[in-house]
Image (cartoon, helix red, strand yellow):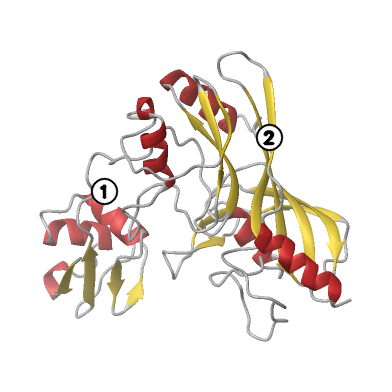
Amino acid sequence: MDLKRLTVDASTAGARLDRWLAERMPELSRARAQALIDDGRVRVDGRARKPSHRVTRGERIEVEIPPPAPETLAPESIALTIVFEDDAVLVVDKPVGMVVHPGAGHASGTLAAAVLAHAPGTAGVGGPRRPGVVHRLDKDTSGLLVIAKTAAAYDSLTAQLVARTVTRRYRAIVHGRIGVAGGVVDKPIGRHPHDRVRMAVLPRGRGKRAVTRFAVLERFSHFTDLEVGLETGRTHQIRVHMASLGHPVAGDRVYGGRPGRAPLPVPIEGLALHAAELAFVHPGTGTPLQFTSPLPPRMARLLSHLRSER
């Protein structure tokens, strides 16, 4: 990681932060400067700012420039839990702890690298470092993902996602006892205004529309077991929406909120969040396909402890 430290002088005060960076650091395009700011890699006097921040004289700017990612992805022989496969699509059950595609701090051991080793023909489908990846799950979320094995399948599946005809249902165990039988969260999501690594619910007119539906399956004294459905697919959507209701997902250290919540009765690896159902239309045959994944042991164990405490 290359760390640059700069200071704003009087002659450049008042410029937008992204433009100021691009002018002071010729090796960065303005788009690259904006991306670094959005990723939380630029700090102004120790704080994350928006690309539109107007710099003032004397402000100290720190810029972290990660090493360039290789343009190609090396296949890695990693075991996959395959639920379905044919010439067009591959449905896998991702374990908790596995990153879907390479990113900062996760150059190897990814699902994408495992897919490339299993199905070399996915190389170049959807992008060199995301072979066939149509949608993603967080590292600490487990469950079902569909991978496109051909360009035609990729185009069809991404179009289905845009049209909101792909069914994605999750199981989530959240903090707090939810009194209603279910509900809909329709709140826009975008980058957190003060922490560019996190996402947040934003005022109307900002961020992207995000819609989450939930239904209560079982209540406990301090937790609730939910079925959750996505109508949109924003980054961290379920985690952000449930936290906005005061019911963050169990095990979520990023959006977990205030201290003093009832502790988990048993430690849990990752999040109590699992992509349990996936349905779409086969891109080649037009046949509706539906897949389910059983509750993973970490969540089944947590539910068992919660039931025993009644």
Dot 1 alpha-carbon crowd within 10 angstroms: few under 14, some 14 to 19, many 20 or more: few
Residue on which disc 2 sits:
291
Q: Secondary structure at mark 2?
A: strand
Q: Which mark is residue 31?
A: 1
Q: Is residue 21 above or below residue 74?
A: below
Picture quarter containing residue 178? Answer: bottom right
Task: State how far apart marks 1 and 2 are (Cα).
Answer: 40 Å
Q: Which mark is residue 49?
A: none
> Would residue 177 be found to the left or right of residue 298 on screen?
right
Q: Residue at x 69, y 22 (%)?
A: 288
Specify the quadrant that holds the N terminus: bottom left
Quarter of the picture containing the C terminus is bottom right
Of 41 and 229, nearer the camera is 229
Q: Earlier in the sequence, mark 1 or mark 2?
A: 1
Extreme residue in the bottom direction: 260
The amino acid beneath tag 2 is: Phe
- Secondary structure under tag 1 reads helix
- Residue 149 location in percent, x, y? 45, 25
Mark 2 neighbour density, 10 Å: few (under 14) some (14–19) many (20 or more): some
Query: In terms of image quadrants, where is residue 304?
Result: bottom right
Residue shown at 71% from the left, 58% from the top: 172
Q: Residue furthest top?
A: 285
Residue displayed at 29% across by 41% down: 73
Whether residue 130 sits left or right of residue 14 in the image: it is right
